[in-house]
């Protein structure tokens, strides 16, 4: 089963599960998860192995929920293999999934790509609560520190252009160049990417330049749910 078929890929805009519902279900079900079957999950070419309770997977991930009700072979054997995924990221997921309501590990300067990879993983596997928690950390970091074009480059090259993370990266990139045009030369390789989202970039740049006060807050510093993936109309799980 391909995780890219997940219903909650934010790029598809089919938000079939709200983070709030996931949270409620976690609280309701976790007391009983120990009785549920253990799923053996192998990850990457090296086949790093993880063993996680089925109920915990199903509660937190729409991808796994779909897998285990579909009658696929994995649902019968309780064994799953994801050759294309990264064990380091899965390790983060395996740690998070038993404590989804606790603080997520913050965005760290020395290992910033890890947080971005976790967000992309959560998008692929339909884990909206984790996505919004990670997004909170990403936005806090990007609003407080100078933007790393290395991070932006990773997002543009590895994340669907329909996702919230991709849109934030482009918006934040335009804002950074508007307030710090001296970084233009540093940013040139990104601007020259053949599939660079030039229309969104220009629109974002114009919206900043047209502001009379010119004191436009960075996209990452804005409150609100513009870059969250939880369903509209449900309480935000990270505020
Ligand atoms: Zn929100």
Image (spheres, grey):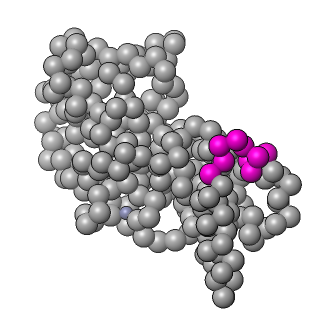
Q: Residue at x 34, y 40 (%)?
A: 126
Residue 132: quarter of image: bottom left
Q: Is residue 196 magenta?
A: yes
Q: Residue at x 61, y 67 (%)?
A: 204
User: Which percent across, then down, holds residue 36?
Assistant: 15, 26
Quarter occupied by the C terminus: bottom left
Q: Quadrant of residue 78?
A: top left
Q: Is residue 14 above or below residue 180?
A: above
Judge whether 13 appears above or below 57 on screen: below
Which quadrant, please, contains the N terminus? Answer: top left
Q: Residue furthest bottom?
A: 212
> Above or below — where is 218 with respect to 2?
below
Left or right relative to 198: residue 136: left
Q: Magenta stretch?
A: 189-197
Q: Which quadrant contains ligand 1?
A: bottom left
Residue 145 is covered by the magenta coloring: no
Nearest to the observer: residue 117 or residue 187: 187
């Amino acid at each position: 089963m391909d995780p890219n078929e997940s219903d909650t890929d934010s790029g598809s805009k089919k938000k079939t599960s709200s983070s709030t519902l996931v949270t409620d279900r976690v609280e309701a079900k976790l007391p009983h998860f120990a009785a549920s079957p253990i799923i053996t999950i192998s990850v990457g070419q090296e086949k790093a192995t993880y063993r996680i309770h089925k109920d915990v997977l199903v509660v937190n991930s729409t991808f796994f929920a779909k897998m285990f009700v579909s009658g696929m072979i994995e649902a019968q054997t309780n064994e799953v293999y994801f050759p294309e995924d990264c064990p380091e990221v899965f390790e983060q997921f395996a740690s998070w999934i038993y404590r989804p309501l606790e603080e997520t590990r913050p965005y760290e300067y020395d290992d910033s790509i890890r947080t971005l990879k976790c967000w992309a993983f959560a998008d692929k596997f339909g884990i909206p609560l984790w996505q919004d928690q990670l997004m909170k950390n990403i936005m806090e970091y990007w609003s407080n520190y100078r933007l790393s074009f290395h991070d932006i480059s990773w997002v543009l090259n590895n994340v669907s252009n329909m996702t919230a993370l991709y849109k934030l990266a482009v918006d934040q990139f335009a804002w950074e160049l508007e307030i710090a045009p001296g970084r233009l030369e540093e940013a040139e390789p990104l601007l020259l990417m053949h599939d660079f989202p030039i229309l969104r970039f220009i629109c974002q740049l114009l919206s900043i330049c047209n502001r009379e006060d010119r004191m436009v807050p960075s996209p990452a510093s804005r409150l609100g749910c513009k870059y969250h993936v939880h369903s509209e109309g449900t309480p935000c799980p990270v505020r």
